[in-house]
Amino acid sequence: MVNNDAPYSESFKVNDRFLMGVTEKDHEWHRLENAATGFSLVASPKIPQVFRLTATMKNSINVTQLQKALNNIIVRFPYFRVNMRTGFFWHFWQTNLDSPKIYPDSKDPNNFMPITNKGEFPFRVKVYKKRIAVECHHTLTDGTGGITFLKALVAEYLSIRGVKSENWGDILRPDQIPKFEEYEDAYRRYSQKTKTGREFLSKAFIIPFKREKVGIYHITKGTMPVKNVLEDAKNYGISITEYIVSNYLESLQELLYSFPANLLKKNLKPIRIMVPVNLRNVFPSKTMRNFSLYILPGIDPRLGRYNFDEIVRQVHHFMKKEVHPKAFISTMYKNTTIERNIVLRLTPLAVKKFFGQRGYYYVGTPAYTGILTNLGRVKFPEEVEEHVEDIEFVPAQVPVNKVGTAMVSYKDKLNINFGRIIKEPIVERFFFRNIARKGIPVKIETN
């Protein structure tokens, strides 16, 4: 029986105790930032909290050279070279003196990482033929941090193979010194005291299908021309993100109204999409740790069925109102206030995890129907880009909502990946059919 989690360790020998001059005296600990604290309290085999970024190359991967590239760039990412440790009150990061390994890829991605095991990294680099995949635990970083790491790995791998560039652009290189601001807890930096109260939303429509066995994760990828999507979005006077969110809401509404009358009545609730916002685009920060918050655009079918124009207007005006520094500052303050609460701080970690997981299942995630993360456009220097055929973003598993969505554009393509833990590909079927109806060609692939 093949163990998909066994590293390619016999292909090459590396010094596990010495990379970048790390010694026992450098075995330091680091506090988790606000989002990571929340992720650490709910993470489990059923809630893996792992997302994935992949680069498909033009040629098959040389694993030995990729391992060398990983050894080289981990020097530039000391905040990734950590292991999560368990204290009495909180989890914390400790410098990991081991070196990360390359793993063979598996059919079902984004599964549980035992990151509290000694020596375990909160990310994994996996390989299958021409594909390099980086799976990151969300306690470590967000999509922006993940793609920065993948780009650095790909660039160093190609550099080892003889590719040269006069200007590496925004790609982090092994000979650079890490900057202090890359370590920062940006939530604490930009949090300011506000007097707004915490809002609690009613439960949203949740897809009523039974989940698969733990570990099974179905991926459906739809690829479409960025130009076509952008043109149709411009026809409505909205951004690509607003356009895709509107199509997603329209598709979920169609799914809801496809139910028999009794099931429709039972599930007639607001439809909301959780849309993470990269706060680096709102506040000046170079942090490589988590720095995003989410907004919840939606429609309420209890008021009647919406046509696409109505959904577009609802989404556009909602996002214009909510994507604002003052709103995010208020949310950051509320979130960090919880950490500063003396009663919570003195509560044992086991108790925090018990209530954290129940809050995840019964309070937080039931407020939205689905998730859509837009990583934006990924670019490489021309010398690198000619060797990289495609970039993909696979969302973390969402056990309550059951279906998650992530999108990224590369070259002239927009890739939208649906990840689901239910057997039926019903949500993506409605979604891609709606996109095709609008005259946008879509190519579908699955895992």
Image (cartoon, rainbow, N blue to C red):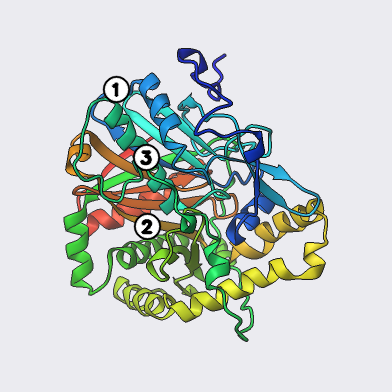
What's the distance in space between the residues labelled 2 and 3, CA to CA?
A: 31 Å
Tell me which residue sits at (82%, 55%) in the image. Answer: 348
Q: Which quadrant of the structure image shows residue 297?
A: bottom left
Tell me which residue sits at (43%, 64%) in the image. Answer: 285
| Residue sitting at the far bottom | 195
User: For this rendering, which residue is in front, 269 or 9?
Assistant: 9
Residue placed under numbered mark 1 in the picture? 60
Residue placed under numbered mark 2 in the picture? 374
Mark 1 packing: few (<14 Cα in 10 Å), some, or many (20+)? few
Could you say where residue 153 lies in the image, as x and y percent from the top left? 37, 36
Tell me which residue sits at (17%, 64%) in the image. Answer: 231
Could you say where residue 41 lies in the image, as x and y percent from the top left? 69, 53
Residue placed under numbered mark 3 in the picture? 175
Whether residue 219 is visible here, answered yes or no, is yes
What's the distance in space between the residues labelled 1 and 3, CA to CA?
A: 27 Å
- Residue 232 sits above or below residue 381 on the image: below
Report the amino acid beneath label 1.
Answer: Ser
Instruction: Indicate which label's residue lies in the foreground, 2 or 3.
Output: 3
Report the amino acid beneath label 2.
Answer: Asn
Q: Which quadrant of the structure image shows residue 248?
A: bottom left
At numbered mark 2, what does the secondary structure look like: helix, strand or loop?
strand
Q: Specify which label sits upstream in the sequence, 1 or 3.
A: 1
Could you say where residue 376 lies in the image, as x and y percent from the top left? 32, 56
Quarter of the N terminus within the rendering: top right
Instruction: Indicate which label's residue lies in the foreground, 2 or 1.
Output: 1
What's the distance in space between the residues labelled 2 and 1, CA to CA?
A: 28 Å
